[in-house]
Structure formats: structure tokens, C-alpha cells
Image (spheres, grey):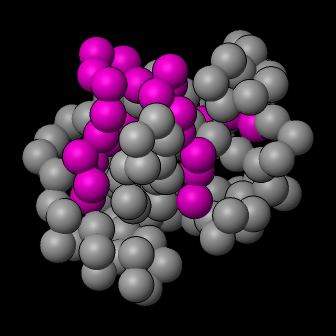
Amino acid sequence: WKGKYGWIQPAEEIQHEKASLRGGRLFVGINDIEGAESLDAGAPVEFHICEDSSGLGAEEVVQTGEGDPEAAAQAGAKGGAKGSAKGSAGGGGNAADAGSASDNIDSLFSQVAR
């Protein structure tokens, strides 16, 4: 987490043309988090996937467990962490103000990467 934004690294591959952008990570902004103002590094989260012109992001993000900074640091060095959360595709603009879901992506298990 970097102040007002962070990244989620999916544990499973997302089948989408923009999934490989940003090293496969999903952007999450402070406005995309439900019930909190930040996420703990390495914490499992639930979210919906959204798309904008720069790639895929996460919205309606909810932290579902404790963070693990050590695991997040190792994941950052290796390019990502694995954990548990659900996702579904959406369409729209910026991840912070994405529109309603239009296409579905299979359920995913993901975790905050940094």
C-alpha cells in the first residue's frame, strides 16, 4: 500500500486481454476500498475487477484477514503474492470510479501484493 493506492496480485491467471499489463497486478485506489482507508500489505481481500484504458483494477475491495508484511516483501521480490479473494469483471472508467459490471471473469483468489 502506497498512501492512496496499492496493488493486488491475483493467485490465479485472469483471462483478459489486459491481464498481463502491470505485471498482472490490479490497481486499487483509496476510493475503491470498502470500510477502511488502506489495506495491510499481504492481507487477503475480496474485490470486483474493473477495466479502464490503462488496464485492470479492483473495486469494492474488502480486506478479509490480517496482513503479512514478510510475505508481501517476498512476493514483491518475486513479482507477486498469492492468497484468497473473489473477483468479477466490470467495465467503466478509472478503477476509482468504474461503471457497472458487464462481463464476468471466473472467481479468483487474490491478495494485496504491496
| 25 or 103: nearer the viewer | 25
Q: Residue at x 29, y 81 (%)?
A: 74
Left or right placement of residue 114 versus residue 24 in this view = left
Judged left or right of residue 28, residue 100 is: right
Residue 86 visible from this viewpoint: no
Q: Is residue 59 above or below residue 71?
A: above
Please state if 11 lies on the left or on the right of 36 as rendered.
right
Please tell me which residue is depicted at 37% across the width and 49% down the height of the picture.
1
Tell me which corner region of the image, top left, top right, bottom left or bottom right, holds residue 13: bottom right
Give the percent coordinates (x, y) of residue 66: 11, 46
Above or below for 60 versus 86: above
Residue at figure coordinates x 49%, y 52% from the top left: 7
Q: Position of residue 104 (x, y in %)?
A: 68, 33
Residue 9 in the figure: left or right of residue 98:
left
Q: Number of callouts in the render? A: 0
Q: Is residue 34 magenta?
A: yes
Image position, residue 83 (x, y; %): 30, 59
Image location of residue 29, percent across then percent down: 53, 33
Depicted 71 relative to depicted 96: above or below: below
Q: Which is more toward the observer, 28 or 15? A: 28
The residue lying at 26 percent from left, 58 percent from top is 42
Residue placed furthest toward the bottom: 78
> Dividing the image into 4 quarters, which one contains the C terminus?
bottom left
User: Can residue 49 be seen here?
Assistant: yes
Outermost residue, left direction?
66
Magenta segment: 25-51
Most extreme residue toward the front is: 3
Residue 104 sits inside the magenta stretch:
no
